[in-house]
Image (cartoon, rainbow, N blue to C red):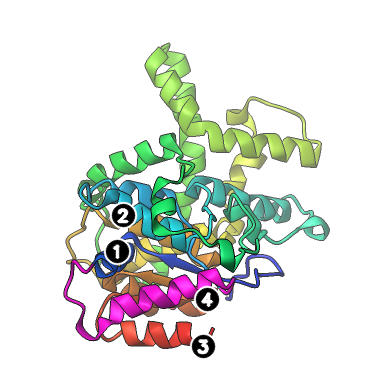
Amino acid sequence: MTFVIGSYRPKKKIVYLDTNFVIDLTKARLGLMQDPGRQMRSLYSRLASLVRHNKVVCPYGVFHDAESELSTNLRDEIRGTIGLLSGGIHWRHWQTILDSQVVPALYKYCGKEEEVQPCDWREAFYQDPDEVLDPDRFPTIESAIRAEFPVDEQGLAAIRASKQEYAQNMRTLPVREARRSYDDYLEEETRGFGALYKRPIAQLVLALEQGDPSAIVSACDAAKPTFRLYEWYLSRTGSERKPLALDSHFLAFFASPEIGRIPSVHILATLYAGLRFYYPKRTPRPGDANDVRMVAAYMPYCDILATDKFVRDITSRLALEREYAVAVYSLGPKDLPHLYQHLATL
């Protein structure tokens, strides 16, 4: 199965630079790292030239904000690097991207095949990636550092919190069991992500029954994506409004096969199933939280994804590169020349 985000892709190539990549580009630019063969400095120069001449854009996202906070001495320089290479283009929050992909699946579930529109790649960005930059007015690093980047404070806080909790939570992920196939795990994980939309509704009902104000507020906040989808569902289907917890047809959508056809859900489920089946002894790292969400949210919209070696290895092993028509490269010395050669063809 090959997943397609919309019938049209931007003319510019979309390149996602993992924060570790941006950090090394920044250090190379500042002369703060050993750079055999000047690979990273050459890579930075090539990327900056491609962005300046409207060939490539490397969007700025909330994960860059979250990760650059950990590099306090270089935070502004790191943001300056990605700010300049972004060409002023910013990713939307990953949950917003996921919600935009759920709607076409809900169309199909409701039997409105003739009305189904593919996900629009523009819904992943705040701005149009094909916006033409004037090469003669291209910003400097200094102006990029001083720029006021829109920050999703709520999303940023959630990412920081999850980064601290993620490694511990991942250790509770069920590990590989005898006589179970990878496909078994993929199906189980897909069902699990569908349940993420249903579970807050059950939690809200329980909180209301118990009259716990703090639990009600928490459950309402967690249920917002489900509420938004329910309003869309009612407006498009003409269905009678019911207490959401009692609308069995709507809630059954989250256990239907359509869930597994949503690109970001498919990627998330594939990665979790792959971790359980192929890497049962690997110790989770705090950085895995951002890596998994980043790949799931951005991969369907990217032409090139520059990330760490483990993400490169697992996406290749699980054939996600082929399914989403994206080239994935790592910071490894064997990958960097191939990435540069790829960019040299653009």
Q: Which residue is mark 3?
A: 345
Q: Is residue 156 left or right of residue 169?
A: right
Q: Position of residue 144 (x, y in %)?
A: 43, 53
Residue at the farthest front position: 136
Verify CB contact (< 8 Å) between mark 4 and mark 3.
Answer: no
- Graded by Cα atoms within 10 Å as few (under 14), some (14 to 19) or many (20 or more), the crowding at tag 3 reads few
State how far apart marks 3 and 2 are (Cα).
28 Å
Q: Earlier in the sequence, mark 1 or mark 4?
A: 1
Q: Residue at x 38, y 17 (%)?
A: 214
Q: Which mark is residue 26?
A: 1
State how far apart marks 4 and 3 are (Cα).
22 Å
Q: Which dot, 3 or 2, sits closer to the camera?
A: 2
Q: Is residue 88 left or right of residue 229?
A: left
State how far apart marks 2 and 1 are (Cα).
7 Å
Q: Position of residue 108 (x, y in %)?
A: 72, 56
Q: Position of residue 317 (x, y in %)?
A: 36, 79
State how far apart marks 1 and 3 are (Cα).
23 Å
Q: Is residue 75 magenta?
A: no
Q: Earlier in the sequence, mark 1 or mark 3?
A: 1
> Is residue 188 at all visible to an observer of this figure?
no
> Where, by quadrant of the figure, is residue 31 drawn?
bottom left
State how far apart marks 1 and 4 are (Cα).
32 Å
Give the residues drawn in magenta, as a range.
Answer: 31-55
Verify CB contact (< 8 Å) between mark 2 and mark 1.
Answer: yes
State how far apart marks 4 and 2 are (Cα).
35 Å
Q: Which dot, 1 or 4, sits closer to the camera?
A: 1
